[in-house]
Image (cartoon, helix red, strand yellow):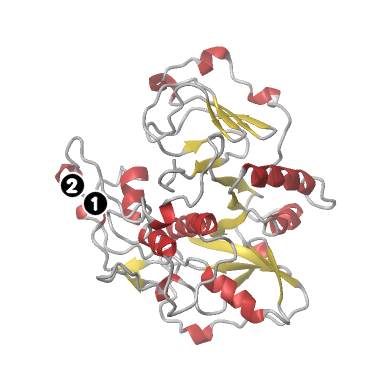
Amino acid sequence: MDAATLTYDTLGFGEFEDFPETSEPVWILGKEFNALTEKDDILSDVTSRLWFTYRKNFSPIGGTGPTSDTGWGCMLRCGQMILGEALVCRHLGRDWRWVRGQPQRGQYISILNAFLDKKDSYYSLHQIERLCMPWLDYGGAACAEPPGWIPKHNGCLEGACALAEEETALWKPLVLLIPLRLGLSDINKAYIETLKQCFQLPQSLGVIGGKPNSAHYFIGYVGEELIYLDPHTTQPAVEPCEDSQVPDDTYHCQHPPCRMHICEIDPSVAVGFFCRTEDDFDDWCMRIRKLSHTRGSLPMFELVDCQPSHLACSVDVLNLTPDEAGIQSEVRCGQAHCTTDKAPFKGNFPDVRGDRVHGKIKFKKTADVGSSGNHILNVYNTPFFMCLNPESGTLC
């Protein structure tokens, strides 16, 4: 239990270990740095990533639930960080830099508003609990929304969530999360080089992982050490100012980043990638294929030309109704071909009525569900696809 509730509130920023002086290259989310000559650039890049940590004194989740996520919210915070990085890349660009005290662009403020710990923020803990953890039901019927109730969310239809350019009908910016198990109790060393090379890809969003009961957001590596942002610091909840600006100092890690030897990481990880355009996706496919042929290491996952025979589903399975089998869909990802298994839950899935093409990802009609949401593939390395709505910038 101590490990599960561990926080670092007693540490001062000055107690963090300085970044190492080394001639080995430093890789952070697809960017290469020299630790000897570009230390300031490294720290600026790390500081510019959104840093979501434990918070306290926010409005009760569900109306009567907890007012702090200390001790239990670290994985959710890491999920917020990897999604926040995707939104920053989508609307501000990978080379965007945060400067303390400098007026920020409206797109940045809208992104940050979407993660504030409030019920009406799109990606707040309150929304995660309502949409993804309904079994918690802190408020019960007393907190249930009336029929036909439509929430009003912060950080959505304006600023960061409005497109600056027209998108083609066949492609939407894509977030790809791939959960993996790279060993039994410890990471298999055969996967280490492949894992490190994922941080070199320009589409990299980093890796969610850590140790048992302690999640971290890994953003790069130097030598045999992984560089990560740690959510285990409890900070007060933040409220927007009257002018809609957000006090954002606590949303950026302003001390040297934490490091962990790669052999210490738990073998359960989720690798993230962001493909803004179809060309980005094609380039990602090409690079992943090259990684699968790296000598001395094993591929963490592979793209295949056709569906493996052992994953084939019978026609009867594909023709089951939503009530009988959840959602059954065929998905083609570039040259990869995967088929979903029975959905782990119902509702909040993409509308798959009729054939719908998303770049090279084709959703074939096999079920009739109405609401938009995330699409989960439940076979082969269980990839988790999310696309960003071209009209609102939110997940679709």
The answer to which of marks 2 and 1 sits earlier in the sequence is 1
Tell me if residue 308 comes above or below residue 78 in the rendering.
above
Point out residue 364 in the picture as x, y percentages from the top left corner: 54, 23
Amino acid bearing label 2: Cys
**Residues at marks 2 and 1 touching, judged by CB atoms closer than 8 Å:** yes
Q: Say whether residue 72 is visible.
A: no
Amino acid bearing label 1: Gly
How far apart marks 2 and 1 lie (CA) works out to 7 Å
Point out residue 142 in the picture as x, y percentages from the top left corner: 14, 45
Q: Nearer the viewer, residue 389 or 38?
A: 389
The residue lying at 32 percent from left, 61 percent from top is 117
Tell me if residue 179 comes above or below residue 100 in the rendering.
above
Neighbor class of circle 2 (other Cα within 10 Å; few <14, some 14-19, many 20+) is: few
Tell me the element at label 2: helix
Residue lying farthest right?
Answer: 295
Point out residue 258 in the picture as x, y percentages from the top left corner: 57, 73
Give residue 308's mark: none
Q: Say which quarter of the image contains residue 60.
A: bottom left
Point out residue 262 in the picture as x, y percentages from the top left corner: 67, 64
Q: Quadrant of the N terminus?
A: bottom left
Residue lying farthest front?
Answer: 165
Q: Say whether residue 128 is visible.
A: yes
Provide the residue designation for mark 2.
143
